[in-house]
């Protein structure tokens, strides 16, 4: 009887410990949910209070998108989530690599315009050649012109890095003096070539 009582007491102690752990976990989960809901509410209120800034960003994305793809619909949304704001730019048929790259361009365009107009910004917007790799030549040229016109409007400098063979295929609008904007930087795959005085490989 004593042995069975000891076993029952051991089982009871284990169950009580499991119950305590479960209640502690439930309390932590409830607190976490409360904090998440509080943060989400604050984010929703913050986005509502900044509706004018969001409107400026939406209009800036539309400017870039319609210049790049006049025949495609698109949206720009800022959605409040428990993990923070979700920024979503979408252009029709955005599954293609080229359009997906231009969605990034449109977001960068809007971000630079809004931040520079309101806060002064960094003074430059820069894009690497990887952004333009899957993009059609017409959109590449248009994007470069948009970057130039944007910085001419709000200030700063637009920098885009392209391979010379890709640049030579681009057809710019009449009146856009592209050659005057190209820096004479040449990287050569020769023994004497390199980058900033360093040789790689």
Image (cartoon, rainbow, N blue to C red):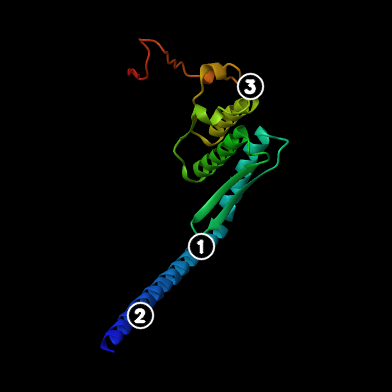
x%, y% of residue 54? Answer: 58, 51
Residue at the limit of the structure toward the bottom, as seen here:
1
Instruction: Mark 1 vs mark 2: give the one in front.
Output: 2
Q: Are marks 1 and 2 in contact (CB under 8 Å)?
A: no
- Left or right: where 11 falls relative to 149: left
Res 51 quadrant in image: bottom right
For the C terminus, the image quarter is top left
x%, y% of residue 68? Answer: 65, 33
Q: Are marks 2 and 3 in contact (CB under 8 Å)?
A: no
Q: Residue at x 49, y 29 (%)?
A: 128
Task: Identify the mark nearer the N-term, 1 or 2.
Answer: 2
Instruction: Mark 1 vs mark 3: give the one in front.
Output: 1
Label 2 SS = helix
Residue annotated with mark 3? 172
Residue at the limit of the structure toward the top, as seen here:
191
Give above or below for 95 relative to 6. above
Residue annotated with mark 2? 16
x%, y% of residue 27? Answer: 41, 73
x%, y% of residue 11? Answer: 34, 80
């Amino acid at each position: 009887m004593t042995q069975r009582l000891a076993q029952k007491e051991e089982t009871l102690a284990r169950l009580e410990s499991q119950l305590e752990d479960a209640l502690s976990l439930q309390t932590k989960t409830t607190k976490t949910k409360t904090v998440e809901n509080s943060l989400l509410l604050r984010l929703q209120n913050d986005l509502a209070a900044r509706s004018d800034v969001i409107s400026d960003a939406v209009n800036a994305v539309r400017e870039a998108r319609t210049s790049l793809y006049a025949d495609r619909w698109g949206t720009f949304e800022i959605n409040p989530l428990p993990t923070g704001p979700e920024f979503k730019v979408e252009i029709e048929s955005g599954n293609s690599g080229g359009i997906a790259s231009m969605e990034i361009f449109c977001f960068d365009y809007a971000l630079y315009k809004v931040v520079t107009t309101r806060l002064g910004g960094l003074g430059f917007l820069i894009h690497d050649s990887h952004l333009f790799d899957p993009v059609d030549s017409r959109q590449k040229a248009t994007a470069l012109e948009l970057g130039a016109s944007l910085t001419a409007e709000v200030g700063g400098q637009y920098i885009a890095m392209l391979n010379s063979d890709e640049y030579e295929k681009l057809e710019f609008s009449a009146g856009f003096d592209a050659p005057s904007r190209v820096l004479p930087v040449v990287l050569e795959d020769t023994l004497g070539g390199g980058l900033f005085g360093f040789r790689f490989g």
